[in-house]
Image (spheres, rainbow, N blue to C red):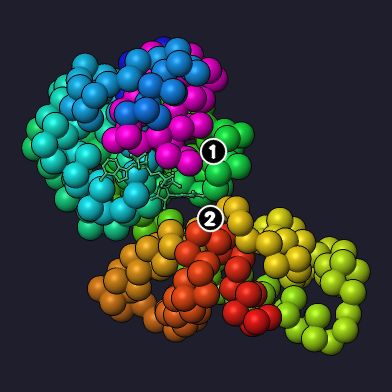
Amino acid sequence: MAKVAFLGLGVMGYPMAGHLKNKGGHDVTVYNRTQAKSEQWAKEFGGRAAATPKEAASGQDLVMMCVGNDNDVRQVTLGAGGAFDGMKKGAVFVDHTTASAEVARELYAEAKKRGFDFVDAPVSGGQAGAQNGVLTVMCGGDSGPYGKAEPVIAAYARMCKLIGGSGAGQLTKMVNQICIAGLVEGLAEALHFAKKAGLDVESVIQTISKGAAQSWQMENRYKTMNEGKFDFGFAVDWMRKDLSICLAEARRNGANLPVAALVDQFYAEVQKMGGSRWDTSSLIARLDR
Ligand code: NAP
């Protein structure tokens, strides 16, 4: 059993923190900006709710966080009442936010200066993955602190791996999002074409999902894409945030991402259609309109 804090009880963080308590059996303190949520969590899971990130982080072996973007990450760690002011020496800070590799490296260096460790550890698997405790966690940092974090992360992960030094977790998440962008657009065009061709989409998918075109997106999203239902899942706004991180990194490392850049613009159109909170599979909506 470890002494753990979890900062940021959103769609992802709330169930993740719950698994730390119920599955991991850890001593868990939570912090959330909107305090009603942390109080609700404490009531539901029986942990403690702290008023600030600093208070939550104080005296913990491990501090996990899952907030929105780079600015939020900086605010919760380094802002007034920030978690870094509460970290004890030798502790490990694990950031599950999808953020830039730059902010990961910046916080890794800051943590080292203050005598504790920082691991960037973005996740994939979505809301369902968080609720079922089967997330994929991609990590960057040093092997010693990673080794301390991994058995605790196991409470909500099916796959957790140290990919490389600081920032490597965020870079791996970028690879993940680049894969998804092109794949979802391909699937959207294929389903759009099947309908225009007058084919029975159910029969088409039953057949081709057993072959080389199969994908997680196909298995899990073709039905709702075909029905034009997008009111769930991973929001377009979040995907655009992630793609902007990918495109900024590509400008630095010289990678060519023509399809990811184009799909980002398609998502901008979906936002204009009112789809900011729609699932990423809503790319088909701009083809079908
Ligand atoms: P969410 O439901 O919007 O929750 C965000 C959480 O961060 C909330 O607890 C929010 O507090 C807190 N927060 C945001 N900015 C803050 C700030 N400046 N100071 C303090 N707290 C702040 O988001 P989510 O869906 O859980 O996603 C969180 C992260 O995981 C994002 O980086 C996202 O890209 C990534 N992710 C999400 C999914 C998914 O399917 N949702 C999948 C993989 C990765 P309040 O309650 O006060 O607003």
**Residue 62 is one of the magenta-drawn residues:** no
Q: Secondary structure at mark 1?
A: helix
Instruction: Name above or below for residue 205 compared with residue 21.
Output: below
Work out whether residue 26 can be spotted: no
Numbered tag placed on residue 130 in the rendering: 1
Location of the N terminus (image quadrant)? top left
**Residue 31 is one of the magenta-drawn residues:** yes
Q: Secondary structure at mark 2?
A: loop
- Foreground: 261 or 37? 37
- Callout 2 crowding tier (Cα within 10 Å): few <14, some 14–19, many ≥20: some
- Foreground: 244 or 91? 244
| Left or right, residue 111 beside residue 258 | left
Q: CA distance from mark 2 to mark 1?
A: 12 Å
Dot 2 or dot 1: first in sequence order is 1
Query: Residue 246: percent from the left, percent from the top?
Result: 37, 68
Numbered tag placed on residue 234 in the rendering: 2
At label 2, the amino acid type is Phe
At label 1, the amino acid type is Ala
Q: Are marks 2 and 1 in contact (CB under 8 Å)?
A: no
Query: Residue 181: percent from the left, percent from the top?
Result: 53, 70
Instruction: Say whether mark 2 is within 8 Å of ligand 1.
Output: yes
Residue beneath the point at 33% across and 20% down:
49
Image quarter for ligand 1 equals top left
Per the rendered image, the range of residues in magenta is 6-34
Location of the C terminus (image quadrant)? bottom right
Residue beneath the point at 34% across and 49% down:
68
Work out whether residue 240 can be spotted: yes
